Amino acid sequence: MDVNEFLARPLVARVATVGPSVRPVWFIWEEGAFWWLTGAYSRLERVIAEDPRMALVVDTCEPATGEVYSVTCQGNAETVALDRARAVRKLGKYLGPVELWPARFSEPLEDPATKMVRFVPDRPPRLQDRSWQVQMPICT
């Protein structure tokens, strides 16, 4: 699996800011950056303004198969104006077609306080395969 294929999956990223503070986010990986929504409900915009350094991890762990993959990045973030088309692509990744979204996901796109976070890693993301082989019990 390549890194872009992995990051296109509807996985949750965990973002750590200086403080430290860790939060889960739904994201989209486009144009060499991770993007997600923020708004008046969060203090993230203020945190980024004070110190834009951030770390992010996206990972999977399937104990039944031994499959473990991860992407870990460090870099800087900025808060930017809402890009509605990008936000719809991001939410669609997790929720499917717009007409199926609960109102709590579509309403923020109409709120002028809603913005996007653009997180640019210091280095291109690299997919780490940390899988192990599951040993099946031998039955006799």
Image (cartoon, rainbow, N blue to C red):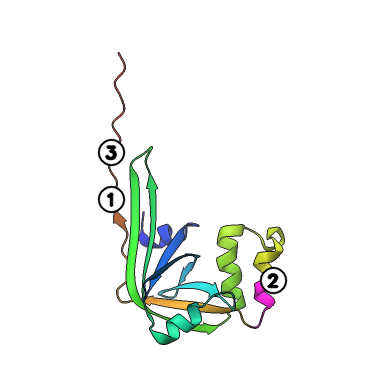
Residue at 58% across, 72% down: 87
Whether residue 66 is situated above or below residue 100 in the rendered picture: above
- Under tag 1, what secondary structure? loop
Evaluate whether residue 78 shows in this view.
no
Residue at the (56%, 59%) spot, across then down: 94
Q: Which residue is mark 2?
A: 107
Q: Magenta stretch: residue 51 in it?
A: no
Residue at the extreme front: 19
Spot occupied by residue 25 in the image (x, y as percentages of width and height)? 49, 65
The residue carrying pointer 2 sits among few (fewer than 14), some (14 to 19) or many (20 or more) residues within 10 Å by Cα, namely few
- Highlighted magenta segment, given as a residue range: 108-112
The quarter of the picture where the C terminus appears is: top left
Return the x and y of residue 20 as percentages of the image width and height.
36, 72
Q: Farthest residue to the bottom: give it.
A: 49
| Residue designated by label 1 | 130
Q: Secondary structure at mark 3?
A: loop
Q: Main secondary structure of the magenta part?
A: helix
The answer to which of marks 2 and 3 sits earlier in the sequence is 2
Determine which residue is flagged by label 3: 133
Picture coordinates of residue 107, whole percent (x, y): 69, 71
Residue 139's place in the image compared with 62, above or below, is: above
For the residue pair 1 and 137, the one nearer the viewer reads as 137
Please state which amino acid type lies under the numbered disc 3: Gln
Q: Is residue 2 in view from this perspective?
A: yes
Q: Amino acid at mark 2?
A: Glu
Single out the mark in the foreground, 2 or 3: 2
Q: Position of residue 128 (x, y in %)?
A: 29, 57
CA distance for labels 2 and 3: 45 Å
Q: Tell me whether circle 2 and circle 3 mark residues in contact (CB < 8 Å).
A: no
User: How crowded is the residue under tag 1: few (<14 C-alpha within 10 Å), some, or many (20+)?
Assistant: few
